Image (tube, coloured by chain):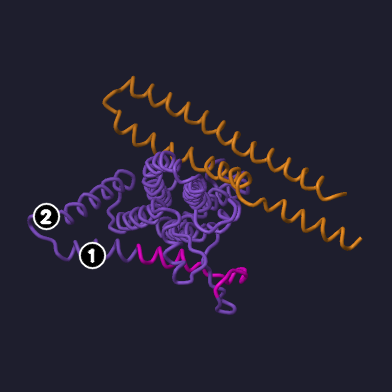
Chain colours: A orange, B purple
């Protein structure tokens, strides 16, 4: 297999992976925040005097919701912008094969 | 963006720690487990000394009519004390002090993110230091160190509060005595996930923030300001929230260890 097709394949899969990482994280947090904000508004509408307390708790849960999505998004961004480590390892493997055989 | 030739290398350069190989005592990674991330260690210790030295200074010079520094310290201590006692109902001086330490230390370590990404590396680059990551909490070693400390405290409090009842609780809790293997397994998983999620949450957020600042720094200089400002303002919220969350979850876990199911 020649080098260009290997590069193309690895890059194609990396782009897919990065897109999935970013989009699924965004999807999950969007649903989570929607539920969270909706329930918060419901709670405040029921008992407005509990607003400040509920706000603090909402932010705590928002931090929980946000966290793992942030990791996923950053892994996606790393694949997009930083040096693709899969590509370098695949390249070194193919050059080894072509030198050896 | 300083000396980098392309964006990939620039990011790569910014993701490398200044590390000390403990096998050979030379700078540079490659020691495997025996690698010490000097930048994380130095920055976190300096921040710790500064923050708690300031608090100590305020405590030593307490006056009847509080000055500005004493006021700030009192507001902080009072706030943490109230937050702790809302959750944890026993008499304690250990928990508020633990919570204060965690909150302030993590907050200021996170706040290193707000320094420009190239500032410390460039300044230290003049002294011949090749890599420097200025945010200690963007290093999983630091966050895992803190969360393992919390984990050991959870175990300690479990033993201290329950003694012989602990085993009974572990074997019989959610499903009753006949399903004891499942109960035991659930309990072990529950306990082991705590330090993992604490550490990864903090690390993930700080790493994400740092990386986005780096990505902004790749843009040409005339367009950097708007996204940089927006992200920095949003990040002030994130760093406070994550420090508060780490403290809050620590207290919740410890009070769960104290009170049981």
Q: Distance between the residues labelled 1 and 2?
A: 15 Å
Relative depth, front residue between B169 and A83: A83
- Secondary structure at numbered mark 1: helix
Residue B97 percent location from the top left of the image: 30, 58
Residue B88 sits above or below residue B226 on the image: below
Q: What stretch is highlighted in magenta?
A: B27-47
Q: Residue B66 carries which label?
A: 2
- Please tell me in which quadrant of the rendered image residue B157 appears: bottom left
At 24% across and 61% down in the image, what residue appears?
B55
- Residue under pointer 1: B56
Picture residue at 26% right of the left edge, 26% below the top? A49
Residue A29 location (% of width, % of height): 52, 33
Is B35 included in the stretch rendered in magenta?
yes
Q: Determine whether A62 is above or below B172 in the image.
A: above
Q: Which numbered disc covers residue A95?
A: none
Q: Residue furthest bottom?
A: B24
Q: In this orientation, does residue B258 appear?
A: no
What is the residue that sits farthest to the right in this orientation? A101
Q: Mark 1 lies on which chain?
A: B
Q: Where is residue A77 in the image (x, y as percent from the top left)?
A: 58, 44
Give the quarter of the figure containing the C terminus of chain B. top left
Q: Which chain carries label 2?
A: B
Left or right: B77 in relation to B152? left
């Amino acid at each position: 297999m020649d080098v260009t097709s290997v590069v193309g394949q690895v890059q194609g899969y990396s782009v897919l992976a990065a897109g999935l990482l970013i989009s699924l994280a965004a999807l999950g947090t969007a649903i989570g925040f929607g539920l969270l904000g909706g329930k918060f508004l419901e709670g405040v509408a029921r008992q407005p005097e509990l607003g400040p307390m509920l706000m603090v708790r909402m932010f705590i849960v928002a931090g929980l919701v946000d966290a793992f999505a942030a990791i996923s998004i950053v892994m996606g961004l790393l694949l997009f912008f930083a040096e693709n480590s899969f590509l370098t390892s695949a390249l070194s493997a193919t050059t080894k094969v072509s030198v050896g055989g | 963006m300083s000396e980098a030739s392309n964006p990939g290398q620039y990011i790569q350069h910014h993701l490398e720690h200044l590390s000390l190989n403990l096998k050979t005592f030379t700078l540079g990674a490659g020691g495997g487990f025996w690698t010490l991330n000097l930048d994380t260690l130095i920055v976190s210790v300096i921040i710790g000394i500064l923050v708690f030295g300031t608090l100590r200074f305020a405590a030593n010079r307490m006056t009847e009519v509080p000055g500005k520094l004493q006021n700030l310290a009192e507001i902080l201590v009072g706030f943490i004390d109230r937050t702790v006692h809302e959750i944890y109902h026993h008499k304690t001086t250990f928990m508020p002090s633990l919570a204060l330490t965690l909150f302030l230390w993590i907050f200021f370590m996170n706040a290193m993110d707000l320094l420009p990404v190239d500032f410390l590396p460039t300044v230290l680059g003049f002294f011949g230091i090749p890599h420097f990551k200025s945010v200690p909490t963007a290093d999983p070693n630091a966050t895992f160190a803190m969360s393992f400390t919390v984990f050991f405290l959870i175990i300690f409090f479990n033993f201290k509060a329950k003694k012989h009842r602990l085993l009974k609780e572990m074997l019989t809790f959610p499903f009753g005595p006949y399903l004891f293997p499942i109960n035991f397994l659930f309990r072990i998983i529950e306990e082991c996930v705590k330090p993992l999620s604490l550490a990864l949450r903090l690390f993930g957020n700080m790493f994400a923030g740092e990386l986005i600042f780096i990505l902004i720094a790749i843009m040409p200089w005339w367009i950097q300001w708007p996204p940089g400002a927006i992200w920095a303002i949003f990040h002030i919220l994130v760093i406070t929230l994550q420090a508060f969350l780490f403290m809050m979850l620590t207290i919740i876990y410890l009070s769960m260890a104290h009170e049981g199911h």
